[in-house]
Amino acid sequence: MADHRSKTEISFAGRFASSAIAACFAEICTIPLDTAKVRLQLQKKAVSGDVATLPKYRGMLGTVSTIAREEGMAALWKGIVPGLHRQCVFGGLRIGLYEPVKSLYVGENFVGDIPLTKKILAGLTTGAIAITIANPTDLVKVRLQAEGKLPAGVPRRYSGALNAYSTIVRQEGVGALWTGLGPNVARNAIINAAELASYDQVKQTILKIPGFSDNVFTHLLSGLGAGFVAVCIGSPVDVVKSRMMGDSAYKGTLDCFVKTLKNDGPLAFYKGFIPNFGRLGSWNVIMFLTLEQVKKLFAKEVRV
């Protein structure tokens, strides 16, 4: 008699949909921290005469409360519409393509633990592909988040996400939607590799420890590990990306890097580290916990 075994498979459409759903849910939960992070990163040293004045935004919770007090609670969810556009495209592609690309790099018949280098390479590849397509959504999200409280009588640059897309195209040209693509590809390829490869690796390591199984607690620990690694590695490029997208005064990636280093010092590249970890750590935990559950809805048993 033939030995009929079964394995679980998910189609690319299922992977894309589950990744997009998980990424969007995580975005909704954590965007107030992302708004705080963007404001902190765009804040330059304020100088009055020869004396440096106190910065407007101080710390993650301080920034959140300042924005809520001055602009209302809704301001913390500024950029949520393009943020969800971004996660549908970027999240769906970078996470959905990770397993197929990883399999492509190791070969179809590979048996055993996939090497960490292959996981990192797959993460770099899918992150770069996904953000090249999703860059316009990222640009609009940062522009909307960067706009603080305006003086009375001063109109806002954009009335909303769709207005921002059309205004940027009309005033700056279609190519402007891909402003900051260089640092954005660098940042997202690096952070994607750090997130997905470290989640993959941490989960694989935990599952080898006696008493651990593929459950919510394992997913929680792996998600926290992924968030911490991603922030440590990706923070400098994240600061450069936010500054380039929020301010058109920089000529390019190198110019932004040099000016930031000269004017604000090396610690500026880790500006907003705590909100960034608060954001990415919680984002990864929520996203991976949701993803592991949603994937079950799209999985189907296949006989082998």
Image: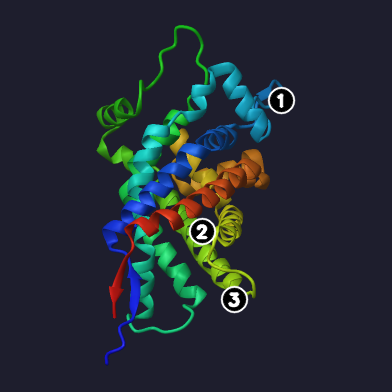
Locate the N terminus by quadrant: bottom left
Answer above or below: position of 253 versus 166. Answer: below
Vertical relation: 275 (above or below) 288: above
Quadrant where the C terminus sits is: bottom left
Can you identify the residue that label 3 sits on?
208
- Label 3 or label 1, whichever comes before in sequence order: 1
Q: Nearer the viewer, residue 178 or 129?
A: 129
**x then y, percent, for residue 169:** 26, 32
Residue in the foreground of this view, choosing between 215 and 67: 215
**Residue sticking out furthest to the top:** 153
Q: Is residue 176 left or right of residue 119?
A: left
Q: 90 and 15: which one is in front?
A: 15
Which residue in the structure is indicated by mark 2?
195
Residue at position x 58%, y 52% from top?
231
What x and y, as percent, mark residue 33? 56, 37
Give the class, few, some or many, for how many residues have Cα within 10 Å of label 1's Cα (few <14, many ≥20).
few
**In front: label 3 or label 2:** 3
Q: Where is residue 55 in the image (x, y as percent from the top left)?
A: 67, 27
Report which residue position mark 1 lands on: 54
